[in-house]
Image (cartoon, helix red, strand yellow):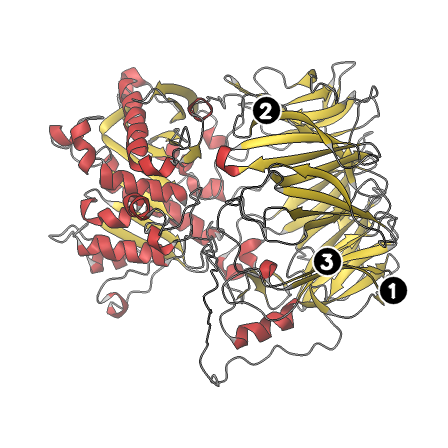
Amino acid sequence: MRVSAFGVVSVLALLAVAGPVLAQQAGAQQAGAAPTYQEPPQPIADILDSRPSPTPSLSPDRQTLALFDRSNLPPIEELAEPMLRLAGYRINPRNNGPANSRISWLTGMSFQDLSGGEPRMVGLPDGARFTSPSWSPDGRSVAFLVDESEGMALYVAGVQGGPARRLTTARVNAATGSGFDWLPDGSGLLVRMVPAGRGGAPDVTRPPTGPVVEETAGRAAPVRTYQDLLGNPGDEALFDHYFTSQLTLVGLDGTTRNLGGPGVILGASTSPDGRYVLQTRIKRPYSYVVPAGLFPTEIFVTDMQGRLVHGVADLPLRDDVPTAFDAVAPGPRAVQWRADADATLVWVLAQDGGDPRNAAEVRDRVLMLAAPFDAAPTPLIDLKERYAGVVWGDADTALVNSRWFNTRHETRWIVDPSMPGQGRVLLERNYQDRLNDPGQPVTEPDDRGRSRIRFAADGRILMAGQGATRAGEYPFIAAMEPLTAQSEILWRAAPGEYETVIGFLDDSGRRMVTRRESPTAPPNVFLRDLDTGSAMALTAFPDPAPQLAAVTRELITYERSDGVQLSGTLYLPAGYDAARDGPLPLVMWAYPAEFTDAAVAGQVVDTANRFVRPGGSSHLFLLTQGYAVLDDPSMPIVGVNGAEPNDTYVEQLRASAEAAVKAVVDRGVADPDRIAVGGHSYGAFMTANLLAHTDLFRAGIARSGAYNRTLTPFGFQSEQRTYWEATETYTAVSPFTYADRVNEPILLIHGEADDNSGTFPVQSERFYAALKGHGATVRYVVLPLEAHGYRARESVGHTLWEMVRWLDLHVKNAPPRAPAVAAVAAPEAAGG
């Protein structure tokens, strides 16, 4: 490949190999060559085209296993369908459902009795694709949405198999979710339908009648960086058109009845006794700076005729919520039905104005109000931290969680809803602490379809946890004593295996359906009997990528210069022998994380008992091309004793990288002259920083990243301070600031329609321009139609082609560096 004197790939050479590259270089549009997608080398292409394993689901009555066939990577034609970006949502205007970039379609369904027998296939229309399967409360049916040419239609399939039945026309409004919920008695469903006679979409192609004007009168309204917002009156008209829906009761016989009038409905749920509907509707004026969830909102209860019964809240536009992670909007929030009661509302009300900077003994108050909703609300519990959810058990047991981000502290409370007003601390912990996680309560749907705590026969609470240990994650089931929080392990995955419980089949909890895997056995579903010790396979899904079966992996541990313990998983290609083959080119793929406790940051958990196969645009595919991979090496950014982690971000990042490079070089598996670094999103941010501030790596790959933190001025990742509160930190952590120091080749890849907050494509565009302006060796690839993660088969294949090509050119076949540059972990190399 011809390279200019400044190290920038020439335009002609770029176009010869580009694929969907929007090169920001002079003359690129006039070259005349039509860009085409490129295929990755084998066996990567074959693995990408392998059939995904079906997804299992256990019925609420614990009698039937449903298996849902999944589509493979979609063709780019699917992503090319029209898409509207409105108020934080992305929808397909053809079917009034989510955009194809945000949905993974299902293609087939079968049912299998747990007592044995052959699977029963469900008959679907030819070529049908569907989404949002949902069990009926009695476990006899599954409802789902089928994509039809004119929209989404509601279907239902019985567990006996046979043809699925179409319950509605193709008018289900799934713009904000599945668009339907089962009624508690299973007699029908509450469906959000496109209003009858809606007509065509408003014409927004006409010339504007005036400018778009926004104004503030001195009111502080900081907001984080949101994507896909409304931007003009045309967007508002489209939002009204596509997001207005009509609540409709649909019987299993297909009969329909409207419930109230149409509106922009973000949520609707039936009370457990089936007598009321809790609705969340938004209203004007809309905003151009926050998504729909923060628009003016009415939350209220109606009866099953649509008549107003109780108003819960009338919330104003919430565009002035502080940007700190523990900040919330004033007024009722997290409004829901209590799962174990007939019709009791539960919500949370901030007692500090929603601003964590305000001193307050009580941060949040959880309130209850039972039907007929004519009494004063009853406080369930006062919390010293932010409410983080509730799990309902029975009349006298519920578990309430609270958290505080600044300290990563979590408190779990046990409360008695029959004696509200106080709770008892069940346990406290650092919620980032993996090695001491007691697990979460096991929940099961009751006969109304509501998720509730499962208790052991002696009244203890069943808990399910990941069981992280130094040797690996070994999921467990435990019984926790509500009075003391002492737990007894009832079952744990066997050594060398990873097994999770899908559901219990009997009241004693001795028969379970599990999903089990091992390093050599792909995940499959088993029927396990704890009394007999037997485990019968219910599925036999094959290895989706047998070409990688002989790859080896090992957890390696090492120490950072400040004493923080680090680890990473070292993958070596099939057939590799260090003594025979010598050091390999290696790719380090990582993602930094912030901590407040160095000991927690240094926790090590092996993955040796997991079945690992790459998918999508995974960096692990590089193992098929002769590269070693250090996967997820620890990159902790630790702030202790109240210090902000990002104030020493670069120093800690550099120290972690130096330790990782030294570890693989000392093992003799990595050639110090041929090590690359890469990452996606925050990992791309890391990659650019490491190339700017070290000379440890020969090249980098940065996908869908952010590089200039002044473009995210009200916070990013785990940073809560604003740019104006921490100007020096924002500047120091931005690799854009140090574009003149990036002297290693870097490949930038970005989805043209990135929907992730803070990683707008302009981040890569401007970083590319800065690098180009300083003569860096850089390639900028824009994937049309792709969001933050890449989905189309063509895009994924091309991304992997770009990665292999870049690394072959700049790492595998690169000449040795001068000794001073190649020095590993040398402090003088820190300048970049």
Could you tell me the amino acid type at mark 2?
Asp
CA gap, disc 1 to disc 2?
46 Å
Q: Is residue 599 left or right of residue 331?
A: left
Query: How many tags in the picture?
Result: 3
- The residue that disc 3 covers is 125
What's the residue at 31%, 56% (across, down)?
Answer: 18
Which is closer to the viewer, label 1 or label 3?
Answer: 1
Position of the C terminus by quadrant: top left
Q: Position of residue 802 (x, y in %)?
A: 33, 47
- The residue that disc 2 covers is 437
Label 1 element class: loop
Could you tell me the amino acid type at mark 3?
Pro
Report which quarter residue 94 is drawn in. Answer: bottom right
Q: Earlier in the sequence, mark 1 or mark 3?
A: 3
Q: Earlier in the sequence, mark 1 or mark 2?
A: 1
- The residue that disc 1 covers is 305
Residue 460 visible somewhere in the drawing: yes
What's the residue at 25%, 70% (across, down)?
Answer: 30
Task: Work out whether residue 115 or residue 93 is closer to the camera in this orientation and state it.
Answer: 93
Task: Work out whether residue 80 or residue 269 is closer to the camera in this orientation and state it.
Answer: 269
